[in-house]
Image (tube, grey):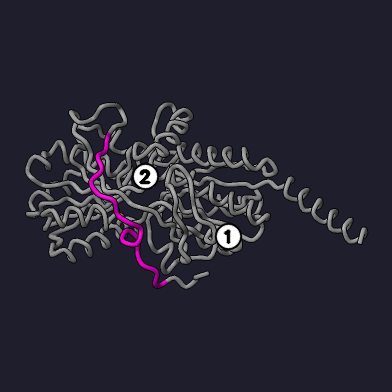
Amino acid sequence: MLRIAAAMALSLFAGSIAYADMTVKVGVLTDLTGPYASLSGEGSITAARLAAEEFEASNPGVKVDVIFGDHQNKADIGSAIVRKWYDQGDVDAVVDITNSAVAFAVNQITRERNKVFLASGPASPDLYGKACAPTTVLWTYDTYAMSQGTGRALAKSGGSKWFFITADYAFGHALERDTSRVVESEGGKVVGQVRAPLNTADFSPFLLQAQSSGANVLGLANAGLDMINTVKQASEFGIARSGMKLAGLLVMITDVRSLGLNAAQGLVVTEPFYWDLNPATRGWSQKFAERARGKMPSSAQAGAYSATLHYLKAVAALGSKTDGAEVVRKMKAMPTSDPAFGNGMIRKDGRKLHDMFVFEVKTPGESRSEWDLYKLVATIAPEQAFKPMGDCVALQ
């Protein structure tokens, strides 16, 4: 009996040594120089580091390293970085990626290497649909959820004729498609659309087409700097004053801050996170702002924090980081909980579930401070916000 007890004690001690020596490496693959830098970029790196510090404080046996790279919105560059991270840099999980083309490439590589992809930045629902993988979780938002929020809210309030200015790549096409379906289901119609390349500087030809189309809603199926430039130029053209409503289909608070309330007021947006939503979001956002030169976090940045924290919790609960698919199964088995997104869960197809919120951008007279930018219009429950499970071939 003493030999058995000694053997058990030795085994437990050996396990604790292995756990104590564990180092988890998370790579933030983000846009540091392009149109999505303000809504992700350095802020997403800061958010992931906050998650690592919070986790290490309660799990002193695990060390977390956070590294980062700039995908430059190019799938080949993003792929090369991630392959090097996995094959030479001992990276266990990749987080962020606000470009869907890069995300699809990383999704496939991550599956092949059996690592973990915490997709906190991309917006394509295909990442939990036809392109789903047992190693990927789509965390923050997607084009389907945005269309259910902004698209349905405006269609129900009289937005019956839509014209789209659409980013000419996978994300923009999906956003236009999903919103068009919602508009048509509410009895409206799409009267026109144009496709604009990434980093378009002059949107005036597209805005002239929108004005002459007879539409009463201008759907902005773009994001980041492209969306900001569209709204600024629409303000100069007097689009809103002419009676046409602007529908920001993927707008974040960092975008509104860049625009200013004079240009952005009245814009209807759908987000899963707002810094001033409740006491928990305010408390976490203040910690973020202390690291980010006073800037409040975007939804994408909050998503990077939330996804990284839950991943680390799953690694600790499992006692291992080696098998990416096994770690994701553990993530799905555990309820999610953090101050940015509250309580939630991860569905079997890899879609993180939480409430989505429809906001209207305040007027300058309604705003009380620099970051007081939104007023809540509606809350959308997860079962209405996100695409139902259906075509995922990697269900766990």
- Real-space CA distance between mark 1 and mark 2, rounded to the nearest whole angstrom: 25 Å
Instruction: Report which residue position mark 1 lands on.
Output: 330
Amino acid, disc 2: Phe
Work out whether 124 lies above or below 224.
below
Residue 322: numbered disc: none
Q: Is residue 386 located in the magenta-colored stretch of the structure?
A: yes
| Horizontal side, residue 285 vs residue 254: left or right | right
**Where is residue 297 drawn, in percent x and y?**
40, 37
**Where is residue 78 drawn, in percent x and y?**
50, 51
Q: Which residues are magenta?
A: 373-391
Mark 2 secondary-structure assignment: loop
Residue 208 showing in the rendered view: yes
Q: Quadrant of residue 383?
A: bottom left
Mark 1 secondary-structure assignment: helix
The residue at 43%/31% (across/down) is 286
The residue at 77%/53% (across/down) is 15
**Where is residue 72 drawn, in percent x and y?**
45, 45
| Between 365 and 235, the one nearer to me in the picture | 365
The residue at 34%/36% (across/down) is 276
Instruction: Report which residue position mark 2 lands on.
Output: 273
**Mark 1 / mark 2, whichever is N-terminal:** 2
Q: Is residue 359 located in the magenta-colored stretch of the structure?
A: no
Image quadrant containing the N terminus: bottom right
